[in-house]
Image (cartoon, rainbow, N blue to C red):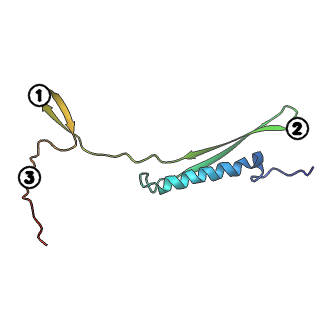
Amino acid sequence: MERSLVTLQTLSGGAANDYFENAMKEVIDNIRDINTPAKSPRRITLTLCIKPTEDRLMAQTELSVKTFLPPIKPFSKSMFFAREKDGVHAYEENVEQPILPFPEISRQA
């Protein structure tokens, strides 16, 4: 049986590579999403925890990945309140502003 040294490519049976590729896809999707801030930094963190045994002849490893992505930008819009017979209601249009009467324009071809 051939022995191989631990490298980033062989770590955890290649899981480090897979974790990174999946995290990078998440980052790219987040960057391409127009609902996220364009200039906010994104971050991928691979963490390898190594816990040696008391005799120091071996160690247990734990590999994890975290992505830090900016959230979707909040959507902002005004809300107007109006008191009516059955209580106060909320509207996205200003109910105090009158609707302007625009005459119908007919197009003749």
> Which numbered disc covers residue 42?
none
Q: Residue furthest top?
A: 86
Would you name the residue on which mark 3 appears?
100
Mark 1 to mark 2 CA distance (whole Å): 81 Å
Where residue 12 sits, quadrant-wise, is top right
Q: Nearer the viewer, residue 5 or 88?
A: 88
Locate residue 27, reporting x and y percent. 55, 52
> Which numbered disc covers residue 85?
1
User: In the structure shown, which secondary structural element does the residue marked by tag 3 occupy?
Assistant: loop
Where residue 59 sits, quadrant-wise, is top right
Q: Which badge, 2 or 3, comes first in the chain's sequence?
A: 2
Locate residue 75, reporting x and y percent. 34, 46
Horizontally, residue 42 falls left or right of residue 12, namely left
| Image position of 34 with respect to 86: above or below | below
Horizontally, residue 6 falls left or right of residue 96, namely right
Question: Which residue occupies 66% across, 48% down?
Answer: 19
Locate residue 41, reporting x and y percent. 51, 53
> Which numbered disc covers residue 57?
2
Q: Are marks 3 and 1 in contact (CB under 8 Å)?
A: no
Q: Residue furthest right?
A: 1
Q: Which badge, 1 or 2, comes first in the chain's sequence?
A: 2
In what quadrant of the picture does the C terminus appear? bottom left
Amino acid type, callout 2:
Leu
Horizontally, residue 102 falls left or right of residue 62, namely left
Q: Residues within 10 Å of mark 3 (few under 14, many from 20)?
A: few
Q: Which badge, 3 or 1, comes first in the chain's sequence?
A: 1
Q: Nearer the viewer, residue 87 or 43?
A: 87
Question: Which residue occupies 53% across, 52% down?
Answer: 42
Mark 2 to mark 3 CA distance (whole Å): 84 Å
Amino acid type, callout 3:
Leu
Q: Are marks 2 and 3 in contact (CB under 8 Å)?
A: no
Q: Are marks 1 and 2 in contact (CB under 8 Å)?
A: no
